[in-house]
Structure formats: C-alpha cells, structure tokens
C-alpha cells in the first residue's frame, strides 16, 4: 500500500509533536507532555494508571462482545494506519530517543502491519471419542498490562496490540520513559483505528508519564490478568516476580559463526546488513562474530566492501571506554560496566567521531579484531560495533559462541554449508531463534518465512509471541454425545 505522506508533511508533523511535547527532542525526555498532537488530544492517554486500567477494562468488555470478524476489521484498520503513518512514527522515534535510523524504523512498521498474526492465529481444537466430544478454545485473559521498550517503541505497541486484540483482550501500556511520545502516538493510532472500524473509542490505554510507580500499580491491580514485558533484564525480573502470569522478552547477545564452507561474500554482506539494521537496536541483531582463521581475512575484506570501517586494537580500547561506562549498584555497591545510553543506537559515524575518526555516510558499521574476553564480545552493545574473534575450528567456535551468548537462549546465527556444523551449533546454543545463511532480521520474517514480533519471549518460553500467546485454554466437555461415527 502506498504511503501518502510527503516529506514536508512529515517534517511539519514532527515539529508540531515536539513543540507540543515541550521543546527540542534532545532536551525534553521525561518532561514531554505526551497527551496531544497537532492540536488534538491523543485518545486513551491518562494521567493516572488506575484510570488507564479502567479504560482498558471497558475496552476489554467491548472487544469481548465483538465477533472474530468484527475484531479482524479493527485489526485491518490498524494495519492500514500503521502502513500509512509508518514514516511519522519512524521519524518521531528517532527524534525522541536519538536512536536508530528512520528508513529502518519505517520498514519495521510496515513489517508489523503486514506480518503480525491476527484472529487467524486463534484456532480451536476438537477431540471426539467413545466418551463424547471435548472442545478446547483459546480465550482472552482479560486486561493485559504491557511494558514496552525505547528501542522499538511504537513497533512493539502496535505489534502487541494486534495480537492482544485478536485474542480478545484489552491492553494498558506502561511505555519506556524515554519513548513516551512515540509509544503514546501508537496507542492513539490503535484507538483511532478501533473507532473507525466500529470498535470502542478506547480499546488500549497508556499513561502520560510512565514511571516505576505506575508500573507497580499495573502489577498489583486486580483487573490485570496477564503481564507482558519487552525490555532489559531488570524490568523483566520485576514482572516475573509480580506473582501474576507473565510473558518476559529479555536481553540477548547473539553470536555469529562463519566457517570455511560458507559463501564468504554473502556472509559478510548479510552480517553487516543485520548488524546495522536500525543501528543494531533489535535484540536479534548480530553482536559478535567467530570466524575460522583461514577465512577471516577474506571475511573482513568483504565486510569493508559493504560499509564496515576497521579500527585498530588501540582504537577499540579507546572506544570501549566511551561506549561502556561504570555503573554502581546502590544496594550492593558493586561497580560494573554498562552501555552508555548516549551511544546506543547511534550511527557508526557518530561513534567513530568520538575517537577522532571522521568518515563518510557510506560507513555503517565499525569492525575490529578482538580476543574473546574483550568487552565488545561480552556486552550486548546495541550499536553498530562488531567484534571479530578468530577461531581454529568448529569445536572452538561453538564453545566460545555459546559462552558469549551467556545462556540467554535468545538468538544465534551461522553461515555455513556444512549441515553437521549447523546442527551441532543449533543444538549447543539452544536459542529461541537460529538463523542460517541470512541476515538476523530474517528470523522475524523480514526476508524470511514466518510471522513477525518484537516480543521474543525466551525466559518464559513462548518464543516469538503472537495472538495465541496472549490466550488461556478453556475446555468444554460433552459426554457421550456428538460422536457420530
């Protein structure tokens, strides 16, 4: 479907949004008033989390009374508006968070619109036998409380909403504080779509200023029957310890193995394409490479042909001291390295400039050779920096790659034509997603088969979530009847 926004219109909208939100995007963050856009009040945004939950509860009651066909009409309208307004949300996301690339965020919204499963994912099961008939159906939980990230804010809101609505739930969001405006714009889009398709005016809800306190209200509120969290380890742990049914999509540190049977030219391009997609913000993106020694030089050369800039070990050390900063745990006093928020999702050129290197717009990735213990290998950076570790053979490659993944069991990649090598690594790493001979984003349906999602629930086992993930099974038994054979 064609997108009808002109560049001038998009720029005007972004300027209006930022003006309404209190000033320049680089200075506002938590001071943004995310309740209006272009002079109109956003639908479904509340000052109090309790009011937001009440609104989502009313939305649940309304959607529960609708047929599957009526729900699908709402979802179809959501898809339509998501395609149409993808450039708006992409530009707003970059302006607000300072992370990612507009063209890639636009593509992610189109992907969400096209490949997020709807009501077709809700399928009943029937069993008949000597003792009659048993029907098992996928039923809604009720009101879902959803925590969403700053890395894929509007994409996650829309993707989650489609699946949760298809399942018959109402939804209340507690967005990441650094992506309030973008997230709430998406909430408003869902509600506009619902109203236009004959659904309730407020089907999903959010809050003006999400905080830890509003999250706690969500966790404890009796109307919230399911919690869904897409975010970092800390917030996932808090959701899983809430005492309620929870779906947690946590962190990853996806390794890539390249052996000497791979198509090296294609592998290099695929890895750079995946690593640099939205500046490495997706949790599935390639984070570190383990390359056989006998093909490593060729791989590096081909990467440089595809927009990678090679830095020296000295430059890598200098850059590591900038992109990783000391963070002290206030409870334990333990100091550890964490990624600098000022560097996450930034362009390669911006990161290189921090160490005095100026490059052109054709450079999209920073590569460097490191040892296994280098912080670039051990930390999930979420920026277009790709360490390369030389290995002797498949045994060493698998051993180091599994260790670098840190047991997250999130995503791993491999480029090889050796089916035994591919099988051994897949079995050893045990990740939710395993991508072979393709960029990482093929794992979520972008250039690969299968549906898409931005909530990949490894810790709780749902995997790539869809509408059925947000349902509970209900069984209805009719004894000694309706067995007609």
Image: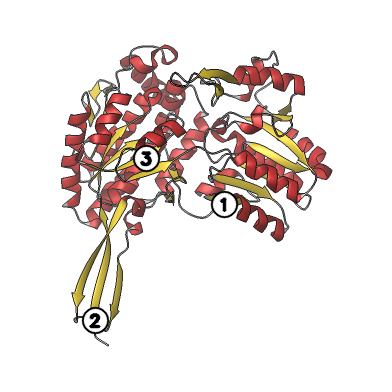
> Could you tell me if the residues under marks 2 and 1 are in contact, i.e. CB atoms within 8 Å?
no
Query: 173 or 250: nearer the eye?
Result: 250
- Residue 451, x across and y down, in percent: 45, 52
Q: Residue at x 71, y 22 (%)?
A: 316
Indicate how the structure is coloured in the image. secondary structure
- Residue 474, x across and y down, in percent: 25, 61
**Vertical placement of 88 versus 225: above or below?**
above
In the rendered view of the protein, which quadrant contains the C terminus? Answer: bottom left
Residue at disc 2, secondary structure: loop
**Vertical placement of 125 versus 355: above or below?**
below
Q: CA distance from mark 2 to mark 1?
A: 40 Å
The residue positioned farthest toward the bottom in the image shown: 485
N-terminal-most mark, 2 or 1: 2
Query: 121 or 7: nearer the eye?
Result: 121
Image position of 163 (left or right of 105): left
- Residue 124, x across and y down, in percent: 30, 65
Numbered badge on residue 131: 2
Name the residue tied to disc 3. Answer: 240
Q: Residue at x 21, y 38 (%)?
A: 56
Query: 54 or 450: nearer the eye?
Result: 54
N-terminal-most mark, 1 or 3: 3
Mark 1: few/some/many CA within 10 Å (<14, 14-19, 20+): some
N-terminal-most mark, 2 or 3: 2
Name the residue tied to disc 1. Answer: 430
- Residue 176, x across and y down, in percent: 38, 28
Q: CA distance from mark 2 to mark 3?
A: 40 Å
Residue at disc 3, secondary structure: helix
Q: Does any portion of residue 384 appear in the rendered image?
A: yes
């Amino acid at each position: 479907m064609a997108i009808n926004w002109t560049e001038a219109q998009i720029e005007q909208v972004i300027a209006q949004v930022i003006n309404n939100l209190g000033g320049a995007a680089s200075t506002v963050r938590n001071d943004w008033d995310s309740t209006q856009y272009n002079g109109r009040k956003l639908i479904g945004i509340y000052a109090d989390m309790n009011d937001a939950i009440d609104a989502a509860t009313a939305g649940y009651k309304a959607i529960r009374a609708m047929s599957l066909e009526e729900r699908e009409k709402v979802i179809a309208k959501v898809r339509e508006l998501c395609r149409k307004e993808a450039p708006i949300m992409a530009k707003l996301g970059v302006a607000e968070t300072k992370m990612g690339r507009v063209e890639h965020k636009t593509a992610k919204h189109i992907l969400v619109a096209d490949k997020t499963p709807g009501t077709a994912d809700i399928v009943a099961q029937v069993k008949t036998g000597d003792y009659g008939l048993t029907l098992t159906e996928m039923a809604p939980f009720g009101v879902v409380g959803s925590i969403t990230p700053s890395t894929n804010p509007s994409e996650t809101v829309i993707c989650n909403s489609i699946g949760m609505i298809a399942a018959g739930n109402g939804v209340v969001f507690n967005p990441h504080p650094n992506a309030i405006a973008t997230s709430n714009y998406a909430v408003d889009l869902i509600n506009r779509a619902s109203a236009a398709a004959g659904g309730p005016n407020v089907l999903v809800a959010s809050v003006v200023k999400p905080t830890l306190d509003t999250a706690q209200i969500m966790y404890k509120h009796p109307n919230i029957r399911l919690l869904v969290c897409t975010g970092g380890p800390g917030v996932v742990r808090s959701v899983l310890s809430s005492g309620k049914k929870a779906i947690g999509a946590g962190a990853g540190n996806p390794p890539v193995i390249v052996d000497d049977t791979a198509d090296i030219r294609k592998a290099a391009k695929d890895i750079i394409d995946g690593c640099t997609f939205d500046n490495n913000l997706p949790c599935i993106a390639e984070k570190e490479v383990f390359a056989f020694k006998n093909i490593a030089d060729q791989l590096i050369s081909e990467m440089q042909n595809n927009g990678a800039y090679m830095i020296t070990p000295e430059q890598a050390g200098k850059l590591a001291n900038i992109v990783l900063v000391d963070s002290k745990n206030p409870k334990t006093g333990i100091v550890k390295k964490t990624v600098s928020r000022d560097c996450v999702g930034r362009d390669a050129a911006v990161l290189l400039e921090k160490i005095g290197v100026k490059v052109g717009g054709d450079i999209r990735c920073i590569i460097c050779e490191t040892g296994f213990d280098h912080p670039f290998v051990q930390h999930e950076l979420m920026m277009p920096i790709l360490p390369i570790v030389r290995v002797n053979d498949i045994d060493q490659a698998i051993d180091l790659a599994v260790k670098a993944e840190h047991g997250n069991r999130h995503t791993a990649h491999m480029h090889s034509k050796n089916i035994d090598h591919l099988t051994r690594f897949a079995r050893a790493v045990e990740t939710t997603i395993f991508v072979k001979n393709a960029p990482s984003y093929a794992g979520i349906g972008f250039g690969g088969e299968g549906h898409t999602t931005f909530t990949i629930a490894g810790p709780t086992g749902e995997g790539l979530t869809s509408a059925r993930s947000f349902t509970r099974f209900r069984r209805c038994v009719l004894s000694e009847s309706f067995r007609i054979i």
